[in-house]
Image (cartoon, helix red, strand yellow):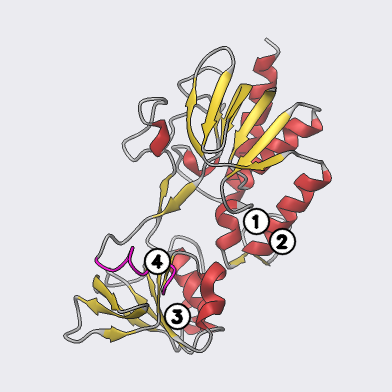
Amino acid sequence: MVYDCVIVGAGPAGLTAAIYQKRANKNVLLLERSLFGGQVATLGNIENYPGYASIDGPSLAENFYAQAKKLQVPIKYDDMQTIKDGKIKQVVCKKQTYEAKSVILALGSVSRELAVEGEKQFFGKGVSYCATCDGAFFKGKKVAVVGSGDSAVASALYLKNICGEVVIISKYPELKLKSYQPNIMERLEGIKIYYGAMIKKIIGTDKVEGVELSSLKRPLKLDGVFVTIGRRPDTDGLKGVLELDEKGYIITDEQMHTSIKGVYACGDVRSKAIKQIVTAAASGAVASTKAMEEMEE
Protein backbone atom coordinates (compact mmCIF):
# COMPACT_ATOMS: atom_id res chain seq x y z
CA MET A 1 0.00 0.00 0.00
CA VAL A 2 1.17 3.52 -0.81
CA TYR A 3 -0.09 5.98 1.80
CA ASP A 4 -0.72 9.64 1.18
CA CYS A 5 1.36 10.34 4.25
CA VAL A 6 3.35 8.36 6.81
CA ILE A 7 3.92 10.19 10.09
CA VAL A 8 6.72 8.94 12.32
CA GLY A 9 6.25 9.72 16.01
CA ALA A 10 3.10 9.90 18.14
CA GLY A 11 3.94 12.87 20.34
CA PRO A 12 2.02 16.19 20.19
CA ALA A 13 3.53 17.12 16.79
CA GLY A 14 2.89 13.77 15.13
CA LEU A 15 -0.59 13.42 16.58
CA THR A 16 -1.57 16.90 15.44
CA ALA A 17 -0.27 16.14 11.94
CA ALA A 18 -2.23 12.86 11.88
CA ILE A 19 -5.44 14.57 13.04
CA TYR A 20 -5.16 17.17 10.27
CA GLN A 21 -4.54 14.47 7.65
CA LYS A 22 -7.40 12.28 8.83
CA ARG A 23 -9.87 15.16 9.00
CA ALA A 24 -8.97 15.87 5.36
CA ASN A 25 -9.79 12.23 4.57
CA LYS A 26 -6.21 11.37 3.61
CA ASN A 27 -4.83 7.84 3.68
CA VAL A 28 -2.47 8.35 6.60
CA LEU A 29 -0.44 6.03 8.81
CA LEU A 30 0.98 6.98 12.22
CA LEU A 31 4.06 5.08 13.40
CA GLU A 32 5.27 4.96 17.01
CA ARG A 33 8.04 2.82 18.45
CA SER A 34 7.25 2.97 22.17
CA LEU A 35 5.23 5.50 24.15
CA PHE A 36 2.07 7.09 22.80
CA GLY A 37 2.12 10.79 23.60
CA GLY A 38 5.91 10.92 23.44
CA GLN A 39 7.75 12.88 26.10
CA VAL A 40 4.43 14.34 27.35
CA ALA A 41 3.53 10.95 28.82
CA THR A 42 6.62 11.11 31.04
CA LEU A 43 5.96 14.58 32.48
CA GLY A 44 4.52 15.51 35.84
CA ASN A 45 2.29 18.55 36.25
CA ILE A 46 1.80 20.74 33.15
CA GLU A 47 0.59 24.32 33.62
CA ASN A 48 1.47 26.01 30.31
CA TYR A 49 -0.69 24.15 27.79
CA PRO A 50 -3.79 26.12 26.66
CA GLY A 51 -7.12 24.77 27.85
CA TYR A 52 -5.76 23.23 31.04
CA ALA A 53 -4.92 25.27 34.14
CA SER A 54 -3.14 22.15 35.35
CA ILE A 55 -2.91 18.60 34.03
CA ASP A 56 -0.43 15.77 34.47
CA GLY A 57 1.49 14.49 31.46
CA PRO A 58 0.01 10.96 31.29
CA SER A 59 -3.54 12.38 31.34
CA LEU A 60 -2.79 14.84 28.54
CA ALA A 61 -1.17 12.06 26.51
CA GLU A 62 -4.26 9.92 27.06
CA ASN A 63 -6.44 12.76 25.77
CA PHE A 64 -4.27 12.99 22.64
CA TYR A 65 -4.62 9.24 22.13
CA ALA A 66 -8.40 9.30 22.64
CA GLN A 67 -8.83 11.99 19.98
CA ALA A 68 -6.75 10.07 17.45
CA LYS A 69 -8.68 6.87 18.15
CA LYS A 70 -12.02 8.67 17.79
CA LEU A 71 -10.93 9.79 14.33
CA GLN A 72 -9.78 6.22 13.60
CA VAL A 73 -6.21 7.22 12.81
CA PRO A 74 -4.39 4.00 11.80
CA ILE A 75 -1.52 3.35 14.21
CA LYS A 76 1.31 0.83 13.97
CA TYR A 77 4.11 0.20 16.43
CA ASP A 78 7.42 0.05 14.59
CA ASP A 79 10.88 1.57 14.93
CA MET A 80 12.07 3.70 12.00
CA GLN A 81 15.66 3.10 10.90
CA THR A 82 15.94 5.51 7.98
CA ILE A 83 14.07 6.88 4.97
CA LYS A 84 14.74 6.55 1.23
CA ASP A 85 13.98 9.29 -1.26
CA GLY A 86 12.10 8.88 -4.52
CA LYS A 87 8.79 9.83 -6.09
CA ILE A 88 7.38 7.39 -3.56
CA LYS A 89 9.19 7.69 -0.22
CA GLN A 90 10.19 4.61 1.75
CA VAL A 91 10.13 4.60 5.54
CA VAL A 92 12.41 1.73 6.52
CA CYS A 93 11.51 0.29 9.93
CA LYS A 94 12.55 -2.75 11.95
CA LYS A 95 9.40 -4.74 11.14
CA GLN A 96 8.73 -3.62 7.58
CA THR A 97 9.08 -0.81 5.05
CA TYR A 98 6.20 1.60 4.45
CA GLU A 99 5.66 3.61 1.24
CA ALA A 100 4.12 7.06 1.01
CA LYS A 101 3.78 10.11 -1.19
CA SER A 102 4.92 12.29 1.72
CA VAL A 103 6.58 11.73 5.09
CA ILE A 104 6.34 13.77 8.27
CA LEU A 105 9.08 13.16 10.83
CA ALA A 106 7.96 13.90 14.38
CA LEU A 107 10.64 11.78 16.03
CA GLY A 108 11.07 13.89 19.12
CA SER A 109 14.09 13.37 21.33
CA VAL A 110 15.60 10.82 23.68
CA SER A 111 17.15 11.20 27.14
CA ARG A 112 20.81 12.06 27.44
CA GLU A 113 22.91 9.63 29.43
CA LEU A 114 25.47 10.36 32.13
CA ALA A 115 28.01 8.09 30.44
CA VAL A 116 29.39 6.85 33.76
CA GLU A 117 30.29 3.38 34.99
CA GLY A 118 27.26 1.44 36.18
CA GLU A 119 24.66 3.45 34.27
CA LYS A 120 23.98 0.88 31.55
CA GLN A 121 24.54 -2.05 33.93
CA PHE A 122 21.79 -0.86 36.29
CA PHE A 123 19.32 0.49 33.72
CA GLY A 124 15.96 -0.90 34.82
CA LYS A 125 17.55 -1.98 38.10
CA GLY A 126 17.52 1.39 39.80
CA VAL A 127 18.56 3.66 36.94
CA SER A 128 15.68 5.38 35.19
CA TYR A 129 15.10 8.31 32.84
CA CYS A 130 11.41 8.78 33.65
CA ALA A 131 10.07 9.63 37.11
CA THR A 132 6.39 9.32 36.18
CA CYS A 133 7.02 5.96 34.49
CA ASP A 134 9.06 4.32 37.25
CA GLY A 135 8.51 6.35 40.39
CA ALA A 136 5.97 3.90 41.82
CA PHE A 137 8.68 1.21 42.03
CA PHE A 138 10.52 3.31 44.63
CA LYS A 139 7.76 3.86 47.17
CA GLY A 140 9.30 4.67 50.54
CA LYS A 141 12.87 4.41 49.19
CA LYS A 142 15.70 6.92 48.80
CA VAL A 143 16.35 8.20 45.29
CA ALA A 144 18.38 10.87 43.54
CA VAL A 145 17.34 13.07 40.66
CA VAL A 146 20.34 14.08 38.55
CA GLY A 147 19.94 17.43 36.83
CA SER A 148 19.56 21.16 37.34
CA GLY A 149 16.72 22.23 35.05
CA ASP A 150 12.94 22.32 34.97
CA SER A 151 12.59 18.60 34.25
CA ALA A 152 14.80 17.68 37.19
CA VAL A 153 12.78 19.86 39.56
CA ALA A 154 9.48 18.51 38.22
CA SER A 155 10.74 14.94 38.67
CA ALA A 156 11.91 15.65 42.21
CA LEU A 157 8.56 17.18 43.18
CA TYR A 158 6.72 14.22 41.70
CA LEU A 159 8.91 11.69 43.51
CA LYS A 160 8.62 13.62 46.79
CA ASN A 161 5.05 12.32 47.13
CA ILE A 162 6.11 8.71 46.55
CA CYS A 163 9.59 8.09 47.87
CA GLY A 164 10.85 8.09 51.43
CA GLU A 165 13.66 10.54 50.61
CA VAL A 166 14.58 12.49 47.49
CA VAL A 167 17.83 14.34 46.77
CA ILE A 168 18.87 16.41 43.76
CA ILE A 169 22.38 16.18 42.34
CA SER A 170 23.25 19.33 40.39
CA LYS A 171 26.60 19.92 38.74
CA TYR A 172 25.95 23.67 38.90
CA PRO A 173 26.10 25.94 41.99
CA GLU A 174 22.42 26.75 41.47
CA LEU A 175 19.34 25.41 39.69
CA LYS A 176 18.96 26.41 36.03
CA LEU A 177 15.22 26.98 35.68
CA LYS A 178 13.82 28.41 32.44
CA SER A 179 10.11 28.42 33.32
CA TYR A 180 8.52 30.43 36.12
CA GLN A 181 7.85 28.25 39.14
CA PRO A 182 6.38 30.22 42.07
CA ASN A 183 7.79 29.54 45.55
CA ILE A 184 9.98 26.81 44.09
CA MET A 185 12.40 26.61 47.01
CA GLU A 186 9.49 26.28 49.42
CA ARG A 187 8.06 23.49 47.31
CA LEU A 188 11.45 21.77 47.36
CA GLU A 189 11.61 21.90 51.15
CA GLY A 190 12.71 18.53 52.49
CA ILE A 191 14.68 17.74 49.32
CA LYS A 192 18.44 17.99 49.86
CA ILE A 193 20.33 19.48 46.92
CA TYR A 194 23.98 18.61 46.29
CA TYR A 195 25.27 21.60 44.36
CA GLY A 196 28.45 21.45 42.29
CA ALA A 197 28.38 17.65 42.39
CA MET A 198 28.85 15.09 39.64
CA ILE A 199 28.30 11.33 39.69
CA LYS A 200 31.54 9.48 39.07
CA LYS A 201 30.11 5.96 39.33
CA ILE A 202 26.84 4.16 40.06
CA ILE A 203 27.47 1.27 42.42
CA GLY A 204 25.64 -1.89 43.43
CA THR A 205 25.49 -5.65 42.95
CA ASP A 206 22.20 -6.78 41.43
CA LYS A 207 20.66 -3.31 41.67
CA VAL A 208 21.58 0.28 42.50
CA GLU A 209 22.93 0.70 46.01
CA GLY A 210 24.47 4.14 45.73
CA VAL A 211 26.65 6.56 43.81
CA GLU A 212 30.12 7.97 44.10
CA LEU A 213 29.96 11.77 44.04
CA SER A 214 32.76 14.18 43.22
CA SER A 215 31.83 16.26 46.28
CA LEU A 216 31.70 13.43 48.84
CA LYS A 217 34.43 11.23 50.26
CA ARG A 218 32.06 8.32 50.86
CA PRO A 219 29.44 6.83 48.52
CA LEU A 220 25.93 8.23 48.83
CA LYS A 221 23.55 5.37 49.58
CA LEU A 222 20.55 5.26 47.23
CA ASP A 223 17.94 2.87 45.88
CA GLY A 224 17.39 4.69 42.62
CA VAL A 225 18.88 7.24 40.24
CA PHE A 226 16.66 9.30 37.94
CA VAL A 227 18.69 10.92 35.17
CA THR A 228 17.21 14.19 33.86
CA ILE A 229 20.08 16.04 32.18
CA GLY A 230 18.38 16.98 28.96
CA ARG A 231 17.56 15.29 25.69
CA ARG A 232 19.05 14.80 22.24
CA PRO A 233 17.34 14.45 18.84
CA ASP A 234 16.43 10.94 17.74
CA THR A 235 18.07 11.25 14.32
CA ASP A 236 20.85 8.64 14.29
CA GLY A 237 19.35 6.94 11.22
CA LEU A 238 19.11 10.20 9.27
CA LYS A 239 22.77 11.22 9.20
CA GLY A 240 23.78 11.65 5.57
CA VAL A 241 20.12 11.44 4.51
CA LEU A 242 18.76 14.80 5.67
CA GLU A 243 20.46 18.07 6.47
CA LEU A 244 21.03 18.23 10.24
CA ASP A 245 22.52 20.94 12.43
CA GLU A 246 25.63 20.47 14.57
CA LYS A 247 23.57 18.96 17.39
CA GLY A 248 21.76 16.50 15.14
CA TYR A 249 18.43 18.33 14.86
CA ILE A 250 16.69 18.38 11.47
CA ILE A 251 17.00 21.71 9.67
CA THR A 252 13.72 23.01 8.24
CA ASP A 253 12.25 26.27 7.06
CA GLU A 254 9.17 27.81 8.69
CA GLN A 255 6.93 25.61 6.52
CA MET A 256 8.62 22.48 7.92
CA HIS A 257 10.35 21.52 4.64
CA THR A 258 13.49 19.41 5.09
CA SER A 259 16.31 19.06 2.55
CA ILE A 260 14.28 16.34 0.75
CA LYS A 261 11.18 17.40 -1.18
CA GLY A 262 8.10 15.71 0.24
CA VAL A 263 9.70 15.06 3.62
CA TYR A 264 8.75 17.37 6.49
CA ALA A 265 9.85 17.58 10.12
CA CYS A 266 8.06 18.96 13.16
CA GLY A 267 8.23 18.97 16.94
CA ASP A 268 11.33 18.62 19.08
CA VAL A 269 13.35 16.81 16.39
CA ARG A 270 13.45 20.06 14.46
CA SER A 271 16.13 22.72 14.91
CA LYS A 272 14.27 25.55 16.68
CA ALA A 273 14.57 27.98 19.57
CA ILE A 274 11.63 26.92 21.74
CA LYS A 275 10.71 23.33 22.54
CA GLN A 276 7.29 23.23 24.18
CA ILE A 277 4.15 21.11 23.78
CA VAL A 278 2.25 23.97 22.18
CA THR A 279 5.01 24.75 19.63
CA ALA A 280 5.29 21.05 18.78
CA ALA A 281 1.56 20.83 18.07
CA ALA A 282 1.67 24.03 16.00
CA SER A 283 4.54 22.74 13.85
CA GLY A 284 2.64 19.47 13.32
CA ALA A 285 -0.31 21.44 11.96
CA VAL A 286 1.96 23.38 9.58
CA ALA A 287 3.79 20.26 8.36
CA SER A 288 0.55 18.38 7.71
CA THR A 289 -1.08 21.30 5.92
CA LYS A 290 1.94 21.88 3.66
CA ALA A 291 2.23 18.16 2.91
CA MET A 292 -1.39 18.04 1.77
CA GLU A 293 -1.13 21.23 -0.27
CA GLU A 294 2.06 20.22 -2.06
CA MET A 295 0.93 16.66 -2.74
CA GLU A 296 -1.78 18.13 -4.99
CA GLU A 297 0.67 20.28 -6.99
Q: Does the rendering let one see residue 43?
A: yes
Which quadrant of the figure contains the N terminus? top right
Q: Secondary structure at mark 2?
A: loop
| Residue at image mark 1 | 49
- Of labels 4 and 2, earlier in sequence is 2
Give the residue type at disc 3. Answer: Met
The alpha-carbon separation of the residues under discs 2 and 1 comes to 6 Å
Q: Which mark is residue 65?
A: none
Q: Position of residue 3 (x, y in %)?
A: 69, 24
CB of mark 2 within 8 Å of CB of mark 1?
yes
Image quadrant in which you'd find residue 284 = top right
Q: Is residue 249 left or right of residue 181?
A: left
Q: Secondary structure at mark 4?
A: loop
Q: Is residue 179 above or below residue 67?
A: below
The crowding category of the residue bearing disc 4, from other C-alpha atoms within 10 Å (few below 14, some 14 to 19, many at least 20), is some
Q: Amino acid at mark 4?
A: Phe
Mark 1: secondary structure: loop
